[in-house]
Amino acid sequence: MKCPNCGANLAEDKLYCEKCGTEFQIVPDMDVNVASEMDDTLSDIALKEFGHDNKKSASKKTSRFDDMEYDDDPTILGLLMRNPKTAWIFYLVVLVVLVVLISVSINLSKNMSKEKSKDYQIELANQALAENDLEAAIKALENAYKADKSDYDLLFNIADYYYTLNRNDDALFTLKEIALNADFSFDVRETAYKKMISLYKNENRFEDISNLLAECEIGTVVNAYEDYLSNAPVFSYESGTYKETIALKLSAEGEGTIYYTIDGTVPTDKSEVYEAPIFLEYGSYTIQAFFKNKYGVSSEVIKANYLIDVSFSFEPDVLTESGEYTSATLIEVDVPIMYTVYYTSDGSTPDKTSNKYMYPFAMPLGDSEFKFISYASDGTESEVVTKNYSLNYASAISPADAVTSLVNGLVERGYIVDDAGHNESYSGRYLYIYVAPYPIENVGDVYLVVEYFEDAAGNTTKTNNIYGINVNTNELYKVQASGQGTYMVTNL
């Protein structure tokens, strides 16, 4: 055999040309007699089954398929369909196939339905729990809940498993899904709220509790945990213009503290603490306040604006009324907010150069007249208020005798060398001036005596020493101011 490409002789056991590398295939020639016998056999089959004489037709055509129409189907399926005797085979096969397909589909559907069923998913969850696989159990219970969204116990179990896994936020989210579901009963939702609050308490998340309660629609829950709420304070007066002084009260529910400002700044827990009504007397005010409960949760800040439009200034309110007195008495004045009070005791009209009232002071013996006036920060002054007093003091010792007893006591103690008040260390002398009787707690009434120093040139300076003499026992004391016009004594 020669290579059809290069003409080289080919080896009998080779399938390619060793000279040029061309591959080739050896196809045996078909025997003419064998082909003729096959043709006769096929013609007999066609004549028997389908009534066609394939061999006779061959003399009239050049191809065995020349007599076919365009849409003739030479397949086995087509041949079966054309012959009534064999068509039933086709239909039987189709029916069997359909039955098989339907059966498979039904089984698949049943299996899929079973896998999605609540009971099947619960069974999977129980199996996962037996293997201590809480993650798988949660997933199975979630699928079970998708199948039956009326079963809230599934959600409670899911929340418990999340909590066991220390996934508290997921547990809270699941419980909230129960609490906010209006389709569940109040008892079920109440239980969910209580579980959420318990989780928040364990983590000291009190602000989250307050926010949760603010959205809660179940009154029994809100009432049970109302201490955790932090509602904004309530103002006793609405914003607006007023023609008179108002005493603004702030209130809030629960235990805690109200912080406020009156200058328009935003309050913090370093601001003024509300303890008593805020008196708004003249001018404009912007009050802002918030409430902080005992758990440290702050409310929102609320604000109100006030304009106090009055056409007069406020007179000082002298609490000690005019009249006759027989025991040591303090003269006390209630100073209007944002005002300063000045007074005189010699009958003259007070002004800003007069004595400034700071705290209660002792009423002098005998008859006296005091005049008081208030000044606003803008210089506006009030009307003058006049008070007349008569203190007739019945005591065993007179003020003059009390001063004498004090001087003699200081000489005995070596503080001064004579009753004129001289001291060995200084060239000047000490003077002792009686002021008034004063009531001192746990001691009784004492005469207050103030010490002055007079130098050689006659200049007088008040020292820091104050003395007291008991009006009945003549006992001597060293007196010290303890603030706001009150005094405490020690034995001299």
Image (spheres, grey):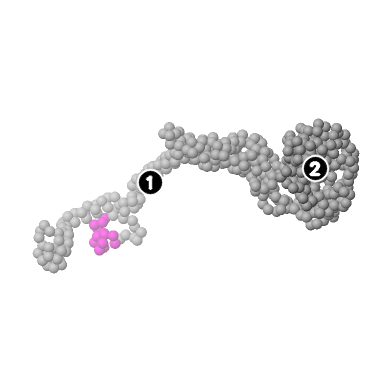
Dividing the picture into quadrants, the one containing residue 293 is top right
Callout 1 amino acid: Val
Is 201 located above or below residue 21 in the figure? above
Determine crowd level at label 2: few under 14, some 14-19, many 20+ residues with C-alpha closer than 10 A: few
Mark 1 neighbour density, 10 Å: few (under 14) some (14–19) many (20 or more): few
Q: Is residue 277 above or below residue 164?
A: below
Residue 420 - label? 2
Say if the magenta span includes residue 423.
Answer: no
Range of the magenta residues?
53-66
Could you tell me the amino acid type at mark 2?
Ala
The residue carrying mark 1 is 94
Residue 300 visible, this orientation = no
Mark 1 or mark 2: which is in front?
2
User: How far, Cα to Cα, is label 1 from label 2?
Assistant: 144 Å
Secondary structure, mark 1, is: helix
Q: Residue at x 47, y 35 (%)?
A: 122
On the picture, is 86 further left or further right than 236? left
Q: Which mark is residue 343?
A: none
* Left or right of residue 268: residue 60: left
